[in-house]
Image (cartoon, rainbow, N blue to C red):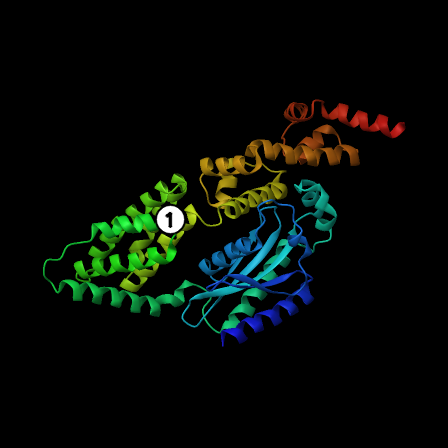
Amino acid sequence: MLKELFESCGNYCEHLSGLSGVCCVTLDLREEPAILDRGVPNSFCSSCLYEKRNELRTHSYGVNEAYRWGGKYIYYCPVGLVFIASSLSDSRGKLLGGIVIGPMIMGVLQDIVQEFPYPDMRPQLAALPVLDTRQVHHLEEILSAVTAAIAGGPHSQLGEIAREQERVMNAIYDVRREYGGNGYRYPIETESRLCSMIAGGDKEGAQKLLDELLGHIFYYSAFDLDQIKARTLELIAVLSRAAIDAGADMGEIFRFSTAFIRGIGKFNTIDEISIWLKGAMQRFISSTFDYVQIKHSDIVYKVMEFTRNNYAGKLSLDELARHVFLSKSYLSTVFKGETGMGISAYINKVRIDKSNALLSGTRLSISEIAQMCGFGDQSYFTRVYKKQTGMSPKKYRDSLARNTVK
């Protein structure tokens, strides 16, 4: 059955590639994750000069994010190209794999080519399909519909409820069988072992220990939902500390924890709490080990794209942080670490590049160019321009005129 399912994915990849001209890939994320089929040969990714290139890891990130966010996800690879992923689940909601379409360029081709970090690959880059945001959205919706039709099941983790019920009941049964109401004590040592599993990135082992702890919590709390929520929040604190000790970013973990804590109040069943807590644990492990480079690159390129599309307005760190759902301090740290420059410096670089095009290609006044490029007034524009280039905008334009005459 699963063989036929993945063969069907391969066929649809061929159709999607033929229709869009974009490479389409099937991912099998079961025991031995692998890229299975391609609709159009992906010569760009296979020859990419990025030293940490790993197609499987990049696309596994996209499919896992799609699985978490309702079956579809648009993301950037480490060099800034756009991909769309849609997850593929079985009838019980278990993630099997997915389909990924890309790379493609979203935005202005000239800008992307100019900023591409590997000049030798720019001719190949220019040959990639260019789509606007509306076209990418349409392709995302079609891809999501295709995977839903192939699998005939849910896209996301919501389908795990039946399986979670079985796990929870087995865990409770094990506790009842061991203690039978006599001499019960909560296994603190199991929490310590769970922390070690998180520190080692052992998802399977951590899940088994989490199931065991949940069995104890439910049994000890006599299925009182308020008590279960209180003990679950204590466990979240343990998971948070374990992730931080393992090297995860403290600010990011605190944000995760806050979101989970706010969400627990809406749950009305033990099954919902179990699935929610499993997601929290997986997120903590992922924040420590999985897809760190890809995740940060995704954030950075979203900021870059937003800046390129909105450079004429009054861009601020607050606005950019809201756009990528991060704190200002964490965004600043990530951006600086990935690009080697601060966000303000990048905004000014984009504006200077745009102003150079207007200085060389139009007869607009310097004051008009300052307004069009987001500097506000001519004096500030001149000051920033001179700091960046070593000359004033007027001198740059005059030098172009002299060179033209020669």
Q: Is residue 337 above or below residue 385?
A: below
Q: Residue furthest left?
A: 182
Query: Quick one: SS at disc 1?
Result: helix
Question: Residue 116 falls in which quadrant of the image?
Answer: top right
- 142 on left or right of 174: right
> Is residue 59 placed above or below 406 in the rendered structure?
below
x and y, in percent, of residue 164 in the image: 32, 66
Residue closest to the eye, 200 or 80: 200
**Residue 362 seen in render:** no
Mark 1: amino acid: Gly
- Which percent across, then down, holds residue 311? 62, 38
> Between residues 99 and 132, which one lies in front from this camera angle?
99
Image position of 172 (left or right of 314):
left
Q: Position of residue 4 (x, y in %)?
A: 54, 76
Residue in view at x 30 percent, y 54 percent? 264
How many numbered circles are shown?
Answer: 1
The 10 Å Cα crowd at callout 1, few under 14, some 14 to 19, many 20 or more, is: some
Residue 271 in view: yes
Is 132 on the left or on the right of 289, as rendered?
Answer: right
The residue at 62%/54% (across/down) is 133
Q: Quadrant of the C terminus?
A: top right
Query: x, y percentage for residue 230?
Result: 23, 52
The residue at which mark 1 appears reads as 200
Q: For the view shown, which residue lies furthest in the right direction?
A: 406
Q: At 44% from the left edge and 39% from the top edge, which residue is drawn?
A: 327
